[in-house]
Every structure is written in C-alpha cells, then in structure tokens.
Image (cartoon, coloured by chain):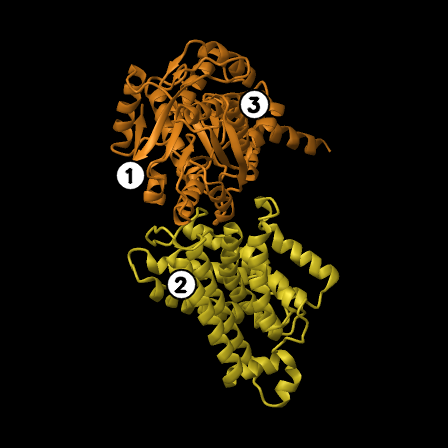
Chain colours: A yellow, B orange
Amino acid sequence: MSLFLQSLLDGLIAGSIYALFAVGLTLIYGTLHFINFAHGELIMAGAYFAYLFMMPPLHLSPFISGGCAIVGVVCLALLMDRSVFSPLRNANSLLLLIASLGISLFFQNLAQVIWGAEIRTFPFPLERGISLGPVVITPVQAWILIIAAGAIFLLYLFLKFTRAGKAIRSVSDNPRLAKTFGVETERVIRFVWIVAASLAAVGGVLYAADTNLEPHMGTINLVRAFAAVLLGGVGNVWGALIGGIVIGLSENLGVLILPIGYKDAIAFCVIILLLLFRPEGILGVRWGVR
Amino acid sequence: MKKIIVFVAIVVSAVLFLAQAGMSSGTIKIGAVQPLSGNLAVYGQGFKMAIDLAVDEINANGGIKGKKLEVIYEDGKGTAKDSVAAVRKLIDVDKVPVILGPAASTNFLAVAPICERAHVVLIGAESASPAITKAGDYIFRVFPSDKLQGKGVADLVIKLGYKKVPVLYINNDWGKGLKDEFVKNFTKKGGKILSEIPYDQGKTDYRAQLLKIKQLHPKAAVALVYVKDGAVIFKQAYELGIQTQWITGSAAKSGKLIKLAGKAVEGLIGTYPNFSTTSPQYKHFVALWKKKYGDKKIGIFAEYNYDMVHLVAKAIAKGGTTPDGIRKALYEVSKGYKGVTGDKTFDANGDVGSAYGVWMVKDGKIVTRK
C-alpha cells in the first residue's frame, strides 16, 4: 500500500512538471501549427541556466537562479523564432518540424560541448525526506508541487483574463477570424513563445531539482510532453495539462506492474496507442478552453 | 595510354616509398581507445595518465630495441558506438598491431570481435565482464574477471552475516556478468536473493528501483554500480529514507563518489581487486607517478594500465611488431611476471587472477577494512 501511495505522490510530482512542458508544446502547436522538437532543449536550457547561476562564481539562491533561467530561456526561444521559425512562417509544417529537429540537435550538442555529457546536480544540501505516514517527500519535492501549481494558476489567470491571453486563445482557435478582428498575429506568436519558454524553463528547473541534469534530458521529456499533448487533444491547453499529470502517474504507477526498465517506454506506448485509436485525444474538445 | 601508366606507376611508387618511410621511422605505434570525453571521462583521463607514465618510462630506458613507443589515442567517448569507430580507425588507418582497449565491458566487448576478425591484439586494463574470457584469441586483459569479484562480493555479504539481500545492478554486460556470478555464489553459500533489479546507465532518476528495495526492508542491499550512477542512486536512497547496509564492488571505489554523494555513502562497504601496496613494484610505481604528476591522486585502475603497457612493450620486444608475434609473446612474457598489481600470468583465455580486499567509506574517506 505504501508503495502505491509513494508512487502516486511521485507520479503527481512528475506529472505536474510534465504538464508545464505539455502546455508550452501545445500552445506552440495551436498558434504555429507544428510540433516543436526543440521544446525539449528549452527545458534542458532552463535547467542548465539555473545551474549556471547557482554554481560559483555567481552562487545565487535557487529562486533567483530560477528567475534568471526563465529570462534566459525566453531570450533563447525568441532568438530561435526570429532566426529560424520566423523566416519559415508560411512554410508547411513538415519543414518547420524538420527545422525544429535541427535546432534540437544543435542545442543538445552545444550543451554537451559546454557542460560535458556527465550528470550534474544542483548544489542542494542532501536531506532525508519527510515521512508523512507511509510516504516520503523531500523538501525540494514539496517546493516543486507548490511552484508547479502556482505556475499553472498564473497561466490560467493569464489566458483567462489578460488581453494577450485572450488574443492567444483567439488565434489558436481561428487565426483568420482573429486577424479580421484586428489581432496582430506576430505579436501573439511572440507572446506564445514567451509563455511556452517560461513554462519550459520552470519545468526544466523543477525537473532538474527533482532528479539531475544531463544534456539529453530534453528528449525524453519532449516525448512525455508529446504524449500528454496527444492525450489532451492537440492544441488543447487544459487537455495537455491533465495529459501531463496522467503521463506522470501512469509512468510511476506502471512500474508497479511492469519491469522497471520500461518506465520510459510508457510515454511511447501512450503515443502509439493514441495515434492508432484516438488521434483526436481522450479528452476531446469538450473540455477544451481553447 | 602509356603516359597514364607511367603516371600511375610514379604515384604508386611514391606512395609506397612514403609508406615505407613512415614504417621505418624510429617509433613503434600502438593504439589506445579510452573514454576521454563523455560519461566515463572521469576514468579515461586517469587511464591515459597511467599509460603515458609507462610509455615515458619505457622510452626513457631506451625504448623497445632502440625504437620509441608511441600511443595513438582515440576517444571512445564511453559508448560502444564511438569505441567501435575509434578501433576501426586505428586498425584501418593507423594499422596498429595492438590496441589498448576501451573501458567498460560493454565497449570492450563491442570492439573485441572487430579486433579478433582483423587479427589485431586487444588488451584491456579495466574490463571485468566474465564474457570477455571467451571473446577470442587476440583478446587479453590484465584486470581480473568478475567471476572472481562476483565471488568476492558474495563472500563479503556472507561474512558480514547477511543472508537475504536484493541486488541492484547496472543493465550492461559488466553489471549482468557480475550480478550472475554474485547470485550464483551467494545462493550456493545459502544466501537468498530477495529481488534482482536492473537499472540503465546515465538516467537521472532511480527512485522506482529504490522504492522496490525499500519495500523489501532488507538489512543489507547489494548495488553493483559505477561512480556516477552510484552517486545518484545512493543520494536518492538517502532521501527516500532507505536504511540498509549498502554493499558494492570496486567500480564505485573513488573519491569522486564521496564528493558527489556526500553523507549518503557513509558506511558503504565494497570489495576490490587487491594487490600488495608494499611490494617494490608498487613503491617504484608510486615514486614514478609522484615524479611525473606531483600530488595528483593516482587514478582508479592506473596500476593495471601501467602493468598493461609494460607487458605489451615486453611482448613487442620479444615477438616483433606483428599482431601474431605479439599475441604469442604475451603468453611467454607474462609467465611469472610480477607487476604492480601482482602476478600477471595469462591463462589460456588471456585472463589473470587476483586477490580481493574490502573497502568502506568512513568519515567521508575511503578506507581499507580488515
């Protein structure tokens, strides 16, 4: 029983992080209509930027480092858009997908050149987890839950109540209609990149805090995010959010039944099954707040 | 037509002449594939330093029959794929007769068939997988097989009084080989394996595996790990509040483990291939190391790499620079050879024997345990 509860908690923590990745991925898809393979590298960059600020000589606190990482990743995402995606704005989505794959490989290798292939860890003190009845949670994990929930709440407020948020939803809903009503598409695209990059950065930092850093950490998380996006229905923000949590839970609960080595395969299986049987997503548009 | 033939003849003879010139220059070139970057780079740099130390010593003493020994390094990056590419380059382009093999049994086993087919001698100083024993006629190692160490860990667990343990092992040739030998010997001595849990190298999260162990509430648990995976695993085990006596092999025996995992590895016990640190050979090695590298710590398995180069140099001196000559000579020169790491006599499979000791982490330091 305690193993089940512990896995449930771990799944929830992982899922809340995946949700942040998935929302960004689906937002980009909603407005630019391609799967951004470089999204994983925004996640990775977030983690490494935070690492950079936390380590000597800067030695900033984790929260300030996280903030700096968000700014850094947003700049990186805007640079990516300006240099590669913007000139290809009217190209078909296959071309964009391949371009994003190229960017992904470039940044993976760049990170490896700069930081090496070895696993790195945030310089947090090693602490015993806190026992809450049958489950153990580390202080870092508690922070992860709080920050992830906070980020999701802020996203909700942003999309629901701000002009920019409403503009994003209108463009992803119907770009032509939005344009007719005077929504500036390019500005919206910029906003989408900022939101997606911020969420990727926050998620990346949290993921690295929960586990460790390595240059290829983006790839597996892209797969998870992609599975979550498909679960929620492509382009559906809240669907992606729930999809992320479902993926986190199924990975951690799945290994109670499956051999542990298959943990990373679960997200892949979800993708294959969904594409075969329900390409529109489990949640459909009914739940969607597009 | 005639002109073309003349031209081709000139080019061919020029190439032959240049190749000849290269051969007859005063160096004997051998190859080395080591993980100079990537996951195993922590080890690779240390191996290179030890190899260079032996090469310098040989060359300072007049080389091999007056010719200087030169090592061509290729970076295997700690992966099978890159190790294979590196070995191919050494065989096809540099045409070396002997290659000092890549670290990690998986990589070593990946390149072994290539060397075996090309009839090039492959010799390793840190690969422990029992599978290497049968890898081929041209395959040697100066490091003891895990057949011996699997038994060593089993003996240790029994000696410490633990009868039931789960075993966590890295899912590659080394880990599986070591695990199988451990399980075989442990059950033979009346021990019981609670669970066999594999894990993949280079992952950031091993909590799923650790939760399984936690669930078993074992008094002791065996973890057959490398340094970096080990650091992640022991830290996460600590965070999860797993309180058990961790027992490991030799691959994690490194100050780096303590640096990475801190108090999470306090009390960790392991076995390691043992050799005398009072022998004249060892003292000579330490003095040499100090002279060249100053206060830099002697890297893990440096002594084995040092012995390996000396054996290869002796074999070249006796058997010439052809792979077959070296292969035959290796058996002869190793017979009764007392290196830094003890007796290096190759058996018919190109394996050596070893003694085992026990190490543990105490007050943040690696100490030998009696």
Q: Is residue B365 above or below residue A172?
A: above
Q: Is residue B87 above or below residue B325?
A: below
Q: Residue A143 — which label?
A: 2
Q: Position of residue A154 (x, y in %)?
A: 46, 76
Residue bearing the label numbered 1 = B364
On screen, residue B305 versus residue A98, left or right, reads: left
Q: Amino acid at mark 3?
A: Val
Q: Amino acid at mark 2?
A: Trp
Query: Crowdedness of circle 2 by 10 Å Cα count: few (<14), some, many (20+)?
Result: some
- Can residue B64 be seen at all in this image of the molecule? yes
Foreground residue, B84 or B181?
B181
Foreground residue, A215 or A158?
A158
Residue bearing the label numbered 3 = B120
Query: Which quadrant of the view contains residue A62?
Result: bottom left
Task: List the single residue furthest toward the bottom.
Answer: A181
Q: Position of residue A248 (x, y in %)?
A: 55, 58
Q: Amino acid at mark 1?
A: Gly
Residue at 46% x, 40% y is B217
Q: Position of residue B118 (x, y in %)?
A: 61, 24
- Can residue A87 be seen at all in this image of the molecule? no
**Could you give the CA–CA distance between mark 1 and mark 2, rounded to whole angstroms?**
29 Å
**Chain under disc 2:** A
On screen, residue B47 versus residue A223, left or right, reads: left
Q: Position of residue B140 (x, y in %)?
A: 51, 20
